Amino acid sequence: MKTLTDSELVVAIRAGSAEAADELFARHWPRAWKAAYAVLGDRTAADDAAQRAVERAIRALDQFRTDGSFGAWIGRIAANQAIDMLRRSPRDAPLPETLSAPEVYAEILERDALLAAVARLDEDRRVVVALRYWLDLDPPEIAEQLGIPVGTVSSRLSRALSDLREIMEVREP
């Protein structure tokens, strides 16, 4: 039996194939989960975010361009879902009791500060940051996924990094 491409699976799902939906889900669940975990840093929350992202992607298949990368598309949806969850989470959540070393607390606080700063970025900039640094896509892949020129990706990344420095009050030497 021939293995279908993602685009062929999408066409089959649009025609009502539950088997195609199962295959597409199995193929891309790890990427969606990885994107959510990269943003949230919590396995349980990543499970929830990735599940919601897959559900959103399946419901929005009519918006997917079959000439694009389904993996990058669902990764972007998962990253956005996770960022939205991060935005809604309480900022003063207690640190886990199992951690004891001061440097571990400092690392958690730095990560949380960075995630909060990324969550404050405009959506266009937040998405390119998540795709570039959490999903390890290069600018041409991001450009293809978003349907924008590579130069636009580069300028959004540059502006996002500048915004992050300002939000986090990082001074350049």
Image (cartoon, rainbow, N blue to C red):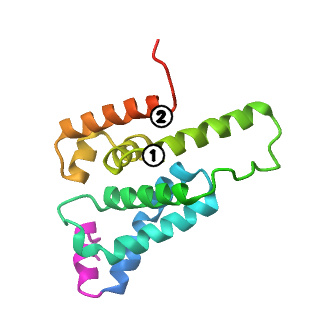
What is the magenta range?
Answer: 1-16
Question: What is the secondary structure assignment of the residue under circle 2?
Answer: helix
Asked if residue 5 can be seen in this view, the reply is: no
Residue occupying image coordinates x 45% and y 46% = 120
Residue 162, picture quadrant: top left
Q: Which residue is mark 1?
A: 120
Residue plotted at (25% across, 34% down): 155
Q: Which mark is residue 167?
A: 2
Question: In screen coordinates, is 41 left or right of 169?
Answer: right
Q: Quadrant of residue 109?
A: top right
Q: Is residue 155 left or right of residue 51?
A: left
Relative image position of residue 21 (x, y in whole percent): 36, 78
Q: Amino acid at mark 2?
A: Ile
**Looking at the image, which residue sits at the far bottom?**
16
Q: Residues within 10 Å of mark 2 (few under 14, many from 20)?
A: some
Q: Vertical placement of 134 versus 27: above or below?
A: above
Q: CA distance from mark 1 to mark 2?
A: 8 Å
Is 3 colored magenta in this rendering?
yes
Q: Is residue 52 magenta?
A: no
Task: Tell whether label 2 touches label 1 (CB within 8 Å).
Answer: yes
Sooner in the amino-acid sequence: mark 1 or mark 2: 1
Q: Give the image location of residue 51, x and y in percent.
A: 49, 70
**Observer-nearest of 149 and 70:** 149
Judged left or right of residue 114, residue 42 is: right
Which SS class for mark 1? helix
Q: Quadrant of the N terminus?
A: bottom left
> Residue 131: image x %, image y %?
37, 47
Q: In the rendered image, is residue 148 in sight?
A: yes
